[in-house]
Image: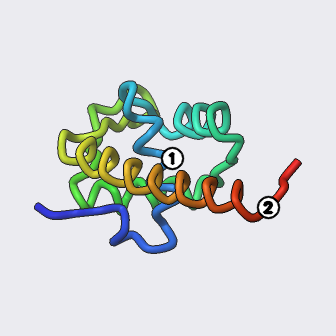
Amino acid sequence: MEASLGELGHYAGPATLILSSLADGPKHGYALMQDIEAFSGVQLQPGTLYGAIQRLEQQGLIEPLAQVGRRRPYRMTAHGAVVLQDHLKAQQQVSEVGLHRLSIGWTVA
């Protein structure tokens, strides 16, 4: 099953945040929203969150766990971990190039 966050197009941002949150263990939707806001400063709206969760599940990058009360926790799959790692390494390379180029031609306070 091949999947990459690049296949998500403009949904890669929420997918990256969700997978990064799930990297340290399973969470339900509200816990995902809280964690994502805490580590990134981004507030995902419920529609964005659950739409991204559905796409990630369809791609086999996350899977639901047994419902606890009204809450459905999700966890990242092994395939999801590989895809997230590859995506973050690619983004790290882009960040390093961008920061280097800024340091050469710009004085940013």
**In the visual, does 42 lie left or right of 25?**
right
Q: Nearer the viewer, residue 99 or 47?
A: 99
Gap between marks 1 and 2 measured at Cα = 29 Å
Circle 2: element type: loop
How many marks are shown on the rendered structure?
2
Residue 104 in the figure: left or right of residue 7: right
Residue farthest along the front direction in this orientation: 104
Pointer 1 local density, CA inside 10 Å: few below 14, some 14–19, many at least 20: many
Between residue 93 and residue 24, name the one nearer to us. Answer: 93
Q: Nearer the viewer, mark 1 or mark 2?
A: 2
- Which residue is drawn at the image coordinates 40% and 44% (left, top)? 19
User: Which amino acid, by three-letter code, is at mark 1?
Assistant: Leu
Q: Quadrant of the N terminus?
A: bottom left
| Residue 88 marker | none
Q: Residues within 10 Å of mark 2 (few under 14, many from 20)?
A: few
Whether 109 is drawn above or below 105: the answer is: above
> Which secondary structure lies at badge 1?
helix
Snapshot quadrant of residue 3: bottom left
Q: Provide residue 86's location: percent of width, then percent of height.
A: 30, 51
Question: Which numbered tag is attached to residue 106?
Answer: 2
At horizontal 44% and vertical 39% (from top left) the residue drawn is 20
Residue at 37%, 68% (x, y): give it. Answer: 6
Q: Residue 75: x percent and y percent?
A: 31, 36
Q: Earlier in the sequence, mark 1 or mark 2?
A: 1
Residue denoted by label 1: 17
Position in image of residue 78 (x %, y %): 18, 39
Q: Callout 2, which amino acid?
A: Trp
